[in-house]
């Protein structure tokens, strides 16, 4: 029968999992860069609601 790894080792696995997962998520967020994409389309990015307001059409 297998023994459980010590608590410190399990804690280390959790910390590594969260660090790697967080790094991947931050990498995706920086690569996608919604603020820059919104500004390229001429809109205004609202950080509080995380949405892009399109620029009004001018005739």
Image (cartoon, grey):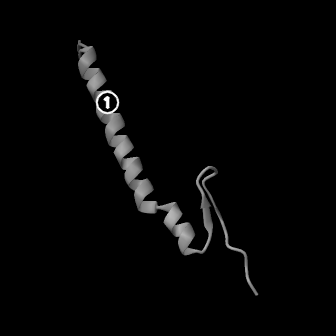
Q: Is residue 31 left or right of residue 54?
A: left
Determine the residue located farthest toward the bottom in the rendered image. Answer: 59
How many other residues sit within 10 Å of disc 1, few (<14), some (14-19) or many (≥20)? few
Q: Is residue 2 left or right of residue 47?
A: left
State which quarter of the image contains the N terminus: top left
Which residue is found at the position 31% from the left and 30% from the top?
Answer: 15
Measuring from the top left, give residue 20's x and y in whole percent.
32, 41
Relative to 31, does residue 21 appear above or below in the rendering? above
Pick the front one: 18 or 4: 18
Which residue is found at the position 68% from the left and 73% from the top?
Answer: 55
Which residue is found at the position 33% from the left and 28% from the top?
Answer: 14
Pick the front one: 24 or 49: 49
* Residue occupied by mark 1: 15
Which residue is found at the position 41% from the left and 48% from the top?
Answer: 25
Relative to 24, does residue 7 appear above or below in the rendering? above
Measuring from the top left, give residue 17's x and y in whole percent.
33, 35
State which quarter of the image contains the C terminus: bottom right
């Amino acid at each position: 029968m297998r023994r459980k790894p010590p608590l410190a080792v399990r804690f280390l696995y959790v910390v590594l999992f969260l660090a790697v997962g967080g790094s991947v998520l931050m990498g995706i967020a920086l690569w996608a860069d919604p603020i820059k994409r919104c500004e390229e389309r001429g809109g205004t990015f609202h950080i509080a609601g995380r949405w892009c307001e399109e620029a009004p059409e001018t005739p």
